[in-house]
Amino acid sequence: ILREYEIPYLAKPGVSPDKQIKLDNLMISVRNGRLILRSNKLNKRILPRLCSAHNFSFNALPVYQFLCDLQSQDIHKGLEFSWGPLEERCLFYPRVTYKNIILSPARWNFRKEHFQDLLQIKDKNLLFNKIQNWCAQYKLPSKVLLGDYDNELLIHFKNKLSVQILISLIKNRASFQLSEFLFDPEEAIVTGENGIYNHECLASFFKQNINES
């Protein structure tokens, strides 16, 4: 149990009854354009937090999704570049940089008509050869990342097994997205006795004063 109180929903509660906040005990109001959730029993404001990595936005029950969405109020989940109205409209988006910072990697959005012919090839050697021509046609690098929501899978077009994995993952899709793989083994920051490692740096920013009046 990570927190003292719990809103039991969809699962058996892990805290004693006096630490449970029932759904019918919650009150909601709007103040200055912000949603305020309170407990009638405790006479306190409730800040719901999902203590798992569950993807609640995928076909979730309305009440559950509402509580999970509410935890992001006043929080900017991350800083990221957006193409705005151009998102998902183009096949190719170039890399966007500012000085020595990559704001957005190069990206390719493929629809069914772009890869339908590849799905018909059964011979593995022929598929491997055709995929090389396909990469040349769309100017794809040898290594890319296949995007699936917030998950990414490295695809190496010079590796037959990797090509087969890609085909198996996209065969039932109407579209898919590839982005350039930015990691350069020659410039690895994290190294060890067993070789080089990919790494990720996270930075958090906090705003101390939020007007709740």
Image (spheres, rainbow, N blue to C red):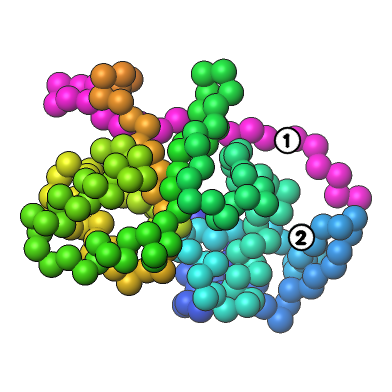
Q: Name the residue at the bottom extreme.
A: 24
Question: What's the CA distance linking mark 1 and mark 2?
Answer: 19 Å
10 Å neighbourhood of mark 2: few (<14), some, or many (≥20)? some
Residue 112: x and y in percent read 39, 66
Residue 147 visible at all: yes
Q: Is residue 69 above or below residue 94?
A: below
Question: Of the residues under marks 1 and 2, which one precedes in the sequence?
Answer: 2
Q: Nearer the viewer, residue 64 or 147?
A: 147
* Magenta-span inclusion, residue 150: no
**Residue sitting at x 60%, y 64%:** 68
Q: Nearer the viewer, residue 116 or 179?
A: 116
Callout 2, which amino acid? Arg
> Mark 1 near mark 2, Cβ–Cβ under 8 Å?
no
- Mark identifier at residue 39: none
**Residue sitting at x 60%, y 70%:** 65
Callout 1, which amino acid? Lys
Residue 146: x and y in percent read 35, 51
* Nearer mark to the viewer, of 1 and 2: 1
Residue 176 visible at all: no
Residue 76: x and y in percent read 66, 45
Predominant secondary structure in magenta?
Answer: loop
**Residue sitting at x 73%, y 35%:** 207
Q: Label 1, on which residue?
A: 207
Which region of the structure is painted magenta?
190-213
Q: Label 2, on which residue?
A: 45
